[in-house]
Amino acid sequence: MSYFLTLHPSSLNLRFYLSVSCFTTLTNLFPTTSSQNQLNITKQTQKHLISLIKSCSKKTHFLQIHAHIILTSLIQDPTISLHLLSRISFSPFRETRYSRQIFDQIPNPNVSHFNTIIRAYSISNSPEQAFYLFKNMRKKCVPTSPLTCSFAIKSCIRFCSLIGGVQIHSRILRDGYQSDSLLMTTLMDFYSNRGKSVQACRVFDEISQRDTVAWNVLISCYIRNQRTRDALCLFDNMNSEENECKPDDVTCLLVLHACAQLGALEFGEKVHSFIEEHGYGDAKNVCNSLIAMYSRCGSLDKAYWVFKGIREKNVVSWSAMIHGFAINGHGREAIEAFEEMQRRSVLPDDQTFTGVLLACSHCGFVDEGMMFLDRMSKEFNILPNIHHYGCIVDLLGRAGLLDQAYQVIMSMEVKPDSTIWRTLLGACRIHGHVNLGERVVGQLIELKAQEAGDYVLLLNIYSSVGNWEKVKELRCFMKEKGIQTTPGCSTIELKGVVHDFVVDDVSHPRKDEIYEMLDEINKQLKIAGYVSEITSELHNLAAEEKGYALSYHSEKLAIAFGVLVTPPGTAIRVAKNLRICVDCHNFAKVLSGVYNREVIIRDRTRFHHFREGHCSCNDYW
Ligand code: ZN
Ligand code: ZN
């Protein structure tokens, strides 16, 4: 989020083009003979020279000015040398090495000289030099300023030095710069970049006059460091009556992103009303984020409503809508939107095609998917990237064309990554394809990207074909290597509060009621023919070890809580960090019919809209 903090020095504007004739006057104005070794310069000539430096737009001209300044010893004039340094450091013909050369020629560089060269290095390819110069200032007893610290911190962000930033932080405290909110915000940005949200938060607490930028940096810090729920709380704090600086459009964008991640629809709606109230709704990027938020929260109608309201839809708006249709299982609508976009002469980009191919894969349109893959490069000159191929592999995998999917991976122009192999592994699980599954896990191991989840998928493949010998073998291997699976976690949002559950969770304040409700639901579902599938998937595998058959996966707890606290007929929306298992999928399917409730579960890869005993994924995920 460093873009918040970019400074724009007005001194660097090009004012007029310096013609060669100006250089003739230059030599006339400052004859080298008159001022050798002694500095004798009037305000008038200083002003004139500075104006020449500022307006210089060619390196050849600059070199001449520089030579002249050296010859006349005018480099000793701090104002002139500063302008010279600044011009070469931030001009279109800038060159950090040349800046350094000039800096080294300045007899006694002051804080402004240091600030200029440190800033130049902080945005160069060798940001570490900025930090060394910062340390050098201390040695030379040149006092720093908040600006110096700010540039030095930015360099530490660039060269990823936690220690460097911490050192600067202690200097800030010693020099008493805590009241400089811009500097403190840069420091927060630094901690956030290094994944230190606690420290970032501490710095935030120290800022006496917090502006919106500081709040936004903290919010983005939380989102980056998986403290998404805290990010939502910050929005509330910011919007509270006691707080003077209110959320702006950037805050809204950040928080919408957080809502999309969490699947927090109610909160997203609250942000939407805030946007309407404050007139941010005219900004296209805000609308596009609203579309993304609503579709990722499974509220496609609202996403479409926002989309319809955009007067001039750009490629991002169209792509967001197509993506929304795709992930919610409305493949036909996604393709129609793509065609409509063409009729309106909006050129698609790679994101648009990700959406279109996703739509094809989620709905099993094999021929269309292959056709779009072909069209994107031939007709629109867009080379398919790994995400596009990922959709194709998913699509072929869904259709059971596993060998073809494998061929696609092997023939891609891009190097296959772990995600694409994992997609194929998922397909192997669905179709019980043991040989290919083993080969894919081999590829993941070769990439050193194997995760516990991959072994779990392989276990599921073995168990689906009843190869218990292999199951046992693999489980021993996992135990030996200490491979632990990621704990599943489900979230459900109610009245703007996000509740989360893990397997067999007993931490919720209403746990007794939740478990009672779950028993009741199980009874009802059993009558309707639901059989807990303890023979498949993880339920069976873990059963021997810890009585897992009696376990309740997190999504079941979240659903039970939803049934408990919402009026009949209300849709239940749950977000889960892992792929939903067969048993929970059946559970939600039957429940949607028996309780006449729409259940929307967003798992790691897609949405499941359960309605009247069916799921939008058609039981493929
Ligand atoms: Zn489950
Ligand atoms: Zn489903």
Image: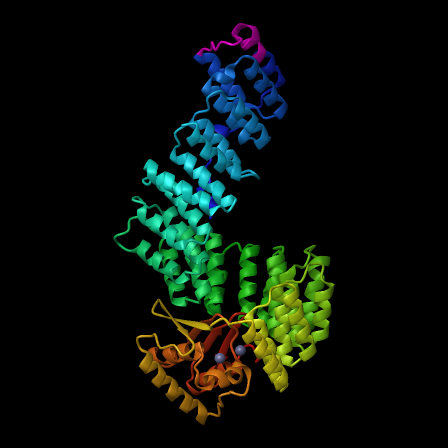
Where residue 52 appears, as percent x and y from the top left, is 53, 19
Image quadrant in which the C terminus is located: bottom right
332 drawn magenta: no
Taking the spot 45% from the left edge, 11% from the top edge, the residue there is 42
37 drawn magenta: yes
Q: Is residue 31 above or below residue 575?
A: above
Q: Is residue 369 above or below residue 533?
A: above
Q: How is the image coloured?
A: rainbow
Where residue 106 appears, as percent x and y from the top left, is 50, 21
101 or 24: nearer the eye? 101
For the image shown, how many numbered marks are present on the structure?
0
Which quarter of the picture shows residue 29?
Answer: top right
Taking the spot 44% from the left edge, 83% from the top edge, the residue there is 551
Residue 589 visible somewhere in the drawing? no
478 or 427: nearer the eye? 478
Where residue 294 appears, as percent x and y from the top left, is 46, 65
**Horizontal arrangement in the rendering, residue 162 relative to residue 63 (left or right):** left
Instruction: List the single residue furthest toward the top.
Output: 34
581 or 544: nearer the eye? 544
Residue 44 visible somewhere in the drawing? yes
Where residue 440 appears, as percent x and y from the top left, is 66, 71
Q: Is residue 172 above or below residue 63?
A: below
- Which residues make up the magenta segment? 26-42
